[in-house]
Image (tube, rainbow, N blue to C red):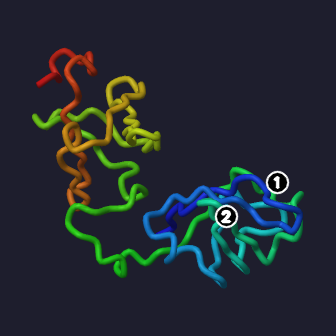
Amino acid sequence: MLLVVGRIGRAHGVAGEATIEVRTDVPDERFYIGAKLILEPPAKGFSHVTITSLRDHNGILLLKFAEVNDRNQVEALRDTLLKADVDMTDEHQHEDEFHVQQLFGLKVALKSGVELGTLDDVINLPGQDLLSIKAAADGREILIPFVLEFVPDVDLEKGIITVIPPEGLLELGEAKE
């Protein structure tokens, strides 16, 4: 499965190093010399990059890629997502662990079983993540904080995320619990 592990940020220096916004809990397993990462969207002329050097600079990950030679090329890749091909069977996940990408498209339902819609996105914010749900009734966006209090169950096998929205968040009348 392809997982987003980072995003290319600003260029650092003139030799083609890129600052990386890390989007993985296991950066040492995703970012290493020789690792091939897929670009999304693909850049002009290539669809992946190969890490040739990495270092920490004041808490910021800096990567150099074989395919990128200078600052201008890094700037052209700015905001491009980096994806890694991860074998989910090797992930040794606990029952309550999952990758965000596994959640997209799952049904979202109230504890009572009333379906709200499908998960469209997970929005990463500094304080907490938000579930962005496309409402089944009218297609509007419903945002629910992705915390245990409001999202008590994620069942990957059944394909259902159970939510208990904060009081007053939903204006669905009969769908309220």
Residue at numbered disc 1: 75
The residue mark sitting in front, 1 or 2, is 2
Residue at 74% in and 62% down:
18
Residue at 28% in and 72% down:
93
Residue 124's disc number: none
The relative height of residue 119 versus residue 31 in the rendered view (above or below) is above
Q: Residue furthest bottom?
A: 34
Identify the image quadrant of residue 6: bottom right
Q: Label 2 neighbourhood size at 10 Å, few (<14), some (14-19), many (20+)?
A: few
Indicate the position of residue 171 as horizontal and vertical percent values: 26, 16
Q: Are marks 1 and 2 in contact (CB under 8 Å)?
A: no
Q: Is residue 23 left or right of residue 38?
A: left
Q: Is residue 97 left or right of residue 13?
A: left
The relative height of residue 166 versus residue 33 in the rendered view (above or below) is above
Secondary structure of the residue carrying numbered label 2: strand
Residue at numbered disc 2: 57
Indicate the position of residue 28 as horizontal and vertical percent values: 51, 75
How many labels, in total?
A: 2
Q: Is residue 171 left or right of residue 41?
A: left
Indicate the position of residue 100 as horizontal and vertical percent values: 40, 55
Residue at 67% in and 64% down:
57
Earlier sequence position, callout 1 versus callout 2: 2
Three-letter code, disc 1: Glu
